Image: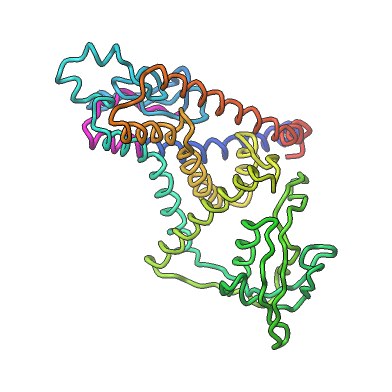
Amino acid sequence: MDAIWNAVSGPLMYGFAFFSVLMIVVFFHELGHFLVARWCGVKVSAFSIGFGPEIGGFYDRHGTRWKLSWIPLGGYVKFMDDENAASVASPDALSKMSPEERAGAFHAKPLWQRAAVVAAGPIANFILAIVIFTFWFWSQGVYTTEARVDDVLPDSPAARAGIKPGDVVTAIEGQPITVFEQIQRNVSTNVGKTLTFEINRGGQKLEIPVTPQVQEQVDEAGDKVRMVLIGVRRIPGQEGMTRYQPGFFEAIGIAGDRTWFVVTSTLGYFGDVVGGRQGADQLGGPIRIADVAGRVASQGWEYIIQLAAFLSVSVGLINLFPIPLLDGGHLMFYAIEAVRGRPLNERHQEIGFRIGMAVVLSLMIFATFNDLHILKRWLGGAV
């Protein structure tokens, strides 16, 4: 019996952690759309967590069906004049509406209101992340580590440049460095670019050029991951770590900075992929998210909430990409409408949504292919 439980408890924890994180992020994303739509007088016919057949739900006093659906990989808010869950307009439905009904139709609203409703989803994700980070830093404090090098990995960019254990990094590219985490931030977003490190070595001031490189590492689960590194590290337990307790409003600022770092590092990675400086093998899908969620859950559920914050930023950012079908694609169409003075015709919009669907499905298939090694590890029982 114990052997059976051990075989299923790991996958169950991973699955439960994954769905918990995903539902938090999806709910707040759709809630952003929903609240601004209601504020603009739009009639909302459905609020769904998940896609496909309905598991269960209820109607609120405004006639909106709140429901949970079988495919828990997203969600949607459907307006009364939408043709489908992607919020594509239904011209036939609009043409048959009375003036009173058109007053609640999303696609009959002014351009600025439609844009506000669409942008509200990603904005809600960013707000959720800032709120979570704020209460985390406010309650747990901020741990910082002195920007001192305890160890230099052999044959690493730092070793070849001449950085030595005991060196203290005081600036990178002229920007002051006070904690070790700032070194990591600068390195992670500058692969292949030579950075000038200002070093304090026993009172001697040095300037050392270092070029961050992508290196293969093995994570806690034994999976190979590619990271941008220079090959320096702090050793846990060494002196130089301090805990700082920020006030509430200061915690908001730190949370905003953390959220912005997730945005810039994500955009930096995509830019490096497009520029050929990094491979796309680090792109992951639901399997990788579930794997990370399960491992994080084993450390405590408070860390799951932190993961929800990171994932919320990513979901908000990706939804702003100008790909038809995503929120950013809708905003792109609205920008074209603002410039032209009229929307694109139905045929062009339909072509755009078909292209967007193909792009999104291709990315999902590619990400799943990247995650097959994780699935293989699960099936092998090494969870």
Q: Position of residue 71 (x, y in %)?
A: 52, 24
Q: Position of residue 308 (x, y in %)?
A: 51, 46
Picture quarter with the N terminus: top right
Picture quarter with the C terminus: top right
Residue 44 is inside the magenta segment: yes
Q: Position of residue 271 (x, y in %)?
A: 60, 47
Lateral position of residue 108 relative to residue 374, left or right: left
96 above or below 176?
above
Q: Based on the displayed image, in which of its 4 quarters is residue 330 positioned?
A: top left
Q: Is residue 3 visible?
A: yes
Tell me how many marks there are.
0
Say which of 50 and 258 sits in front.
258
Residue lying at the far bottom of the rendered structure: 203
Q: Position of residue 360 (x, y in %)?
A: 55, 28
Residue 80 is inside the magenta segment: no
Residue lying at the far right of the rendered structure: 154
The residue drawn where x is 57% and y is 53% is 265
The residue drawn where x is 25% and y is 26% is 43
Lateral position of residue 14 relative to residue 133, left or right: right
The residue drawn where x is 57% and y is 40% is 17
In magenta, the rendered stretch is: 32-49
Lateral position of residue 292 relative to residue 263, left or right: right
